[in-house]
Amino acid sequence: METATAHTSHSEVLKYKIRLARPREQKQLNLFWHHPKFAEVYREHLIRLYYSVSASIPLLECALSRARVLSDTCPVAAALVPYLSEHIVEEQDHDEWLLEDIEELGVPRDKVTSQIPPTVVASLIGSQYYYIKHAHPVSVIAYLAIVEGEPPKKEALDDIALNKGVPKKALRTLYLHAEMDIVHSQELWTVRPQTNGTGVAII
C-alpha cells in the first residue's frame, strides 16, 4: 500500500490524500452520472454549482489579499500572489455561464439568484475563509485541487447530450471546463512545488 513518508513534499502529501479519497468520490460520481432521473438531478446540480462558483472570485481575492500581507516575510505567500492574480482573471464570468446553462433547462435566473444558497455551500466556502484568515492562504490551493482537479471528459458529456435528455447548450460550462481545468490543474501543480515551506502543512 502506498504511504507518505517524513521526506515527502507537501504537494506529494496532498496528492496522496486526494488519491486516498478518489475511490469514494468515484462511487458518488457514478451514482450521479447514472442516475435514472439524470436530467432533473443535473438541473439541481447546476444550481448548486452556481452558488459555489459565484463565490469563487471573492474567495480568491480574499486569499490574494492575505497572501500579499504575508508575502514580505513568507515565501509561500509570495509564491501565491502571481498565481492567484492570474487565476482570478481566468475565473471571470463563469457564474454567468452557469446561469445561461440553467436557463437552457427552463429555470429563470431570477429564481436562482434570489434564493439563499444552501448551507452545504456556505459551509464549504466559509471554511476556506476561516483557514485563509486564521491559518494561511495556501489552504485555498487544496480547495482548488479538488474542485478543478478532475474535470469531466468531453466524451462523457457527448454521451449525456445524446442519451440523458439534457440539451447540449445546457452543458456548455462543463464542456469549457473539460478543456480549461486540464490547464488549470497543470498550473496548480506547477505552483505547488514553490510552496514547500512555512505554513503549507495546512494543505
Image (cartoon, rainbow, N blue to C red):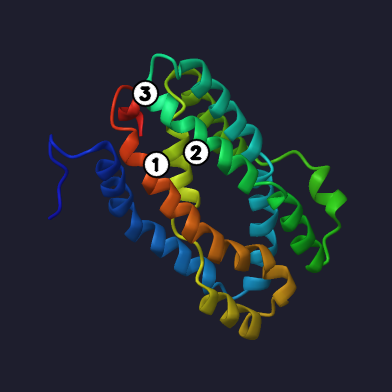
Q: How many marks?
A: 3
- Which of the numbered marks, if any, corresponds to residue 191? 1
Q: Nearer the viewer, residue 76 or 112?
A: 76
Label 3 CA crowd tier, 10 Å (few <14, some 14–19, many 20+): some
> What type is the residue that disc 3 sits on?
Pro
Give the labeled residue for mark 3: 75
The one nearer the camera, 53 or 188, is 188
Mark before the other along the chain sequence, 2 or 1:
2
Q: CA distance from mark 2 to mark 3?
A: 13 Å
The amino acid type of the residue labelled 1 equals Val
Q: CA distance from mark 1 to mark 3?
A: 12 Å
x and y, in percent, of residue 41 in the image: 64, 65
Q: Which residue bears the numbered disc 2?
A: 83
Q: Are marks 2 and 1 in contact (CB under 8 Å)?
A: yes
How many residues crowd mark 2 within 10 Å: few (<14), some (14–19), many (20+)? some
Q: Give me the disc on residue 101.
A: none
SS assignment at label 1: helix
